[in-house]
């Protein structure tokens, strides 16, 4: 760019006229000058008037077109410096496709919520971190026998000197494929600060992170937990997911700290992946 007065053969336009010709604001033209995308062809040293030439029409139109499809200032600079426009366009395309997929997923969830009333369950998709646990896995006659495992496991954990993690994370993992009326394969897990040596039925292990899990809260008696499971599984099926691991029941509040069943709080956690 030349900042001093000189004879210029090509047609020059004051910034105001150039702005009107191209339907771009003067403020935008000044900004493009500041960031080095499009500098005036000539600046009058006496009055500071900015002039643009007819040869700058094509670069301006290209700049505006790239801005409209989401190019950043830095990306446009790289194009001007010779980087392949096709390469950047491919990256932008992949980014937009990802955003569209995320928006469609959000839209599907909104549609689901619009069909629900306040009494129904609301779903959250989140990551479940890796966790060290003390576990006891049993085949029990039915779901009603779950409470029989807790005292035995608690006594063995105390004898082993276990310290529970805070906040507490106590959950069951069901290893059966679906609901079982009898002979339920369940693993009771309690998050601990460190793993000890296995003792009898009490085992210790580290459970891997779950990248995505559909989760919902159930408040009330355990007898109505199947409603929460049903709502969560329906959400999985209707939103392009499939179950990718064993389902967990995370016990937040229960008989150990709440007097009324109405105040018991359980979180259903279903590992999923996009289909």
Image (cartoon, helix red, strand yellow):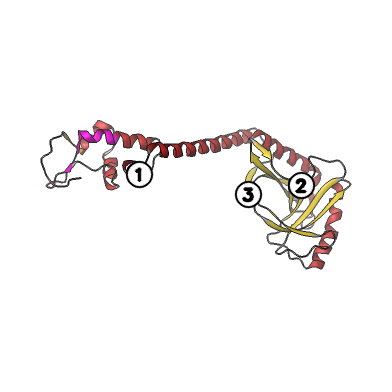
For disc 3, the neighbor class at 10 Å (few under 14, some 14 to 19, many from 20) is: some
- Residue identifier under label 2: 220
Magenta-colored stretch includes residue 28: no
Asked whether the residues under the numbered discs 2 and 1 touch, taking CB atoms below 8 Å apart as contact, a structural biologist would say no
Q: Select label 3 or label 1 by which is in front.
A: 1
Name the image quarter holding residue 193: bottom right
Instruction: Give whichever of discs 3 and 2 has the lower sequence position.
Output: 3
Name the image quarter holding residue 2: top left
Q: Residue at x 70, y 62 (%)?
A: 165
What range is drawn magenta here?
42-60
Q: Quick one: 52 or 118, which is closer to the camera?
A: 52
- Residue identifier under label 3: 127
Residue 108: x and y in percent read 60, 34
- Residue identifier under label 1: 78
Residue 194: x and y in percent read 71, 64
Q: Quick one: 3 or 119, which is closer to the camera?
A: 3
| Alpha carbons under labels 3 and 2: distance apart | 25 Å
* Kind of element beneath mark 1: helix
Asked whether the residues under the numbered discs 3 and 1 touch, taking CB atoms below 8 Å apart as contact, a structural biologist would say no
* Kind of element beneath mark 2: loop
Q: Quadrant of the C terminus?
A: top right
Q: Where 245 falls versus 61 (above or below)?
A: below
Q: Viewed as shown, does residue 15 lie left or right of 103? A: left
Q: Select label 2 or label 1 by which is in front.
A: 1
Q: Residue at x 74, y 48 (%)?
A: 248
Q: Viewed as shown, does residue 260 lie left or right of 64? A: right
Q: Residue at x 42, y 39 (%)?
A: 87
Q: Quadrant of the N terminus?
A: top left
Asked whether the residues under the numbered discs 3 and 2 touch, taking CB atoms below 8 Å apart as contact, a structural biologist would say no
| Alpha carbons under labels 3 and 1: distance apart | 36 Å
Q: Viewed as shown, does residue 65 lie left or right of 149? A: left
């Amino acid at each position: 760019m030349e900042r001093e007065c000189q004879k210029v053969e090509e047609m020059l336009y004051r910034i105001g006229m150039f702005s009107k010709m191209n339907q771009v604001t003067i403020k935008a033209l000044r900004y493009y000058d500041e960031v080095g995308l499009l500098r005036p062809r000539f600046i009058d040293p006496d009055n500071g008037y900015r002039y643009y030439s007819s040869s700058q029409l094509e670069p301006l139109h290209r700049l505006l077109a790239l801005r409209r499809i989401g190019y950043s200032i830095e990306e446009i600079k790289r194009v001007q410096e010779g980087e392949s426009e096709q390469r950047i366009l491919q990256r932008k395309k992949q980014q937009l496709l990802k955003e569209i997929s995320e928006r469609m997923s959000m839209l599907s969830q909104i549609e689901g919520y619009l069909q629900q009333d306040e009494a129904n369950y609301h779903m959250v998709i989140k990551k479940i971190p890796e966790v060290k646990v003390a576990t006891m896995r049993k085949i029990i006659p039915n779901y009603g026998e779950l409470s029989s495992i807790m005292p035995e496991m608690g006594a063995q954990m105390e004898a082993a000197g276990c310290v529970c993690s805070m906040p507490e994370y106590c959950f069951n993992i069901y290893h059966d494929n679906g609901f079982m009326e009898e002979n339920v394969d369940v693993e009771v897990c309690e998050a601990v600060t460190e793993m000890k040596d296995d003792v009898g039925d009490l085992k210790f292990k580290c459970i891997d992170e779950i990248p995505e899990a559909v989760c919902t809260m159930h408040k009330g008696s355990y007898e109505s937990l199947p409603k929460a499971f049903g709502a969560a599984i329906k959400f999985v099926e209707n939103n392009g997911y499939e179950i990718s691991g064993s389902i967990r029941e995370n016990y937040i509040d229960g008989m150990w700290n709440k007097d009324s069943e109405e105040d018991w709080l359980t979180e259903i956690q279903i590992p999923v992946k996009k289909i």
